[in-house]
Each structure stands twice: as structure tokens, then as C-alpha cells.
Image: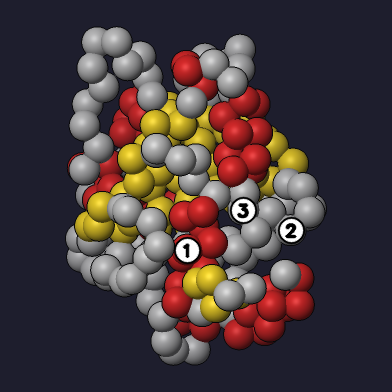
Amino acid sequence: MTSAEAIRHALVLAGGGSRRFRGGDKTTLLVGGATLLDRVLAAVPSGTDTVVVGPERPTGTVVRWTRERPPGGGPVAGIAAGLRLLPPPGPRDGNPLVALLAADHPFLTQDTLHRLAGARTGTSGAGAVLVDDAGRRQWLVSVWPLDVLRSAVPEEPAHAALRSTLGALPVVDVRSVGAEAFDVDDREAAARAADLV
């Protein structure tokens, strides 16, 4: 992979209320001996500037923390909060790539993100989004040019719809491999995740 395709930043959204999980902080759930959050952080390439949006928790990775405004304001508010911590690119940086990830995808790998980044080769300003076996785009497993992601976030991001915010942007669909697109939305999914390890 060329340096132009390297992921420079990662935004990991971990501030949801876990309502479908019926209480508790699902990002601390252990799957295969590691928390959901740590499993997602392990998929981020080494050396990537990583911002986690949500309440601070213990992790095995050095990250920066921030909160969406208001707390519980939804994923677009989380994206906006994370973007506020990312520096503007320098004159030699080009348009760095940002991995946008939810903290409840325990089977992501570094290869997942490399494939997403690589799928953008030859495109102009497009993002790359993981697509599950049912053909659904997983907006929170995606890679974007920083300026494209910044331009998509509305002035008032709280409670804005994620699909409407990102859905109008040019994207490349990347088919998931294995359980990459699996997300832990509820207790039943958590039990299935344990069986997939």
C-alpha cells in the first residue's frame, strides 16, 4: 500500500446508550478474552492517530478521548466530535484517510481496513464502505478522505441521520469477508459472537 492510501486517523464511536443491549456498557463485553472496544482498536493499523468518542474506559491501546455533544446525540454528533480533534492536514499530507468505526464490530481486522483503503485506488474523493452478506452498507465500518468526511457533517449534527449524512457521498462498496460485518446490537448477538471466536 502506498503512503497516499495509508490510514492516518481512526474515529471509533463508543458513546451509544446500548438501548438494544438492555442496559450496561456493551463495549466492555468480553469476546474471546478482549472487550469489544479493544477488539476494534486492535483492527486499527499501528501508528494511527486514534480518537474514541464516548466515556473514558480502560483500553489496551493509547487513544485520545472525546464526547459527542450532547452525550447520546447520535453517531453524526460523535463523528463531529472526533473530527474536532483531528488536525488540518499539512502541505505535504495530501488528503489523509480516516477510518470510521463503531465499537461493536468484534471481528474487524487490520486487513479489513487495508482492503477498504485499497478499494479507493483510482477514485476521486470517494469513501469505501463495508457491505454485509445481505447487501447492507455498514456506514460505521468505512474509510474516508478527511475533507470529504468533514464536508458531510451538518452544522447541527446532534440526532442527524447517519445514512442521510453519508449516503449522498460517493462510495465504493467492499464486500465483507467472514464475520467482519458482524455487530453486537443485543444480548443475543453477544452470545453468537462468543460462539464465533
Q: Where 165 sits versus 33, above or below?
A: above
Q: CA distance from mark 2 to mark 1?
A: 17 Å
Of tags 3 and 1, the one toward the viewer is: 1
One can see residue 170 in this view: no
Q: What residue do we see at 62% from left, 53% from top?
A: 108
The reply to whether dot 3 and dot 2 touch (C-beta < 8 Å) is: no
One can see residue 192 in this view: yes
Q: Quadrant of the N terminus?
A: top right
The location of residue 101, given as percent across then percent down, is 48, 51
**Residue neighbourhood size for the residue with mark 1, other residues' Cα within 10 Å, grouped as few (<14), some (14–19), many (≥20):** many
Q: How is the image coloured?
A: secondary structure
Q: Taking 128 as reference, is 55 left or right?
A: left
* Earlier sequence position, callout 2 versus callout 1: 1
- Name the amino acid type tagged 2: Ala
The reply to whether dot 2 and dot 1 touch (C-beta < 8 Å) is: no
The secondary structure type at the circle numbered 2 is loop
The location of residue 72, given as percent across then percent down, is 30, 70
Q: CA distance from mark 3 to mark 2?
A: 8 Å
Of tags 2 and 1, the one toward the viewer is: 1
* Earlier sequence position, callout 3 versus callout 1: 1
The secondary structure type at the circle numbered 1 is helix
Q: What residue do we see at 34% from left, 26% from top?
A: 147
* Earlier sequence position, callout 3 versus callout 2: 3
- Name the amino acid type tagged 1: Asp
The residue labelled by disc 2 is 179
**Residue neighbourhood size for the residue with mark 3, other residues' Cα within 10 Å, grouped as few (<14), some (14–19), many (≥20):** many
Task: Please name whichever residue, 183 or 149, is drawn nearer the observer in this view of the structure.
Answer: 183
The residue labelled by disc 1 is 38
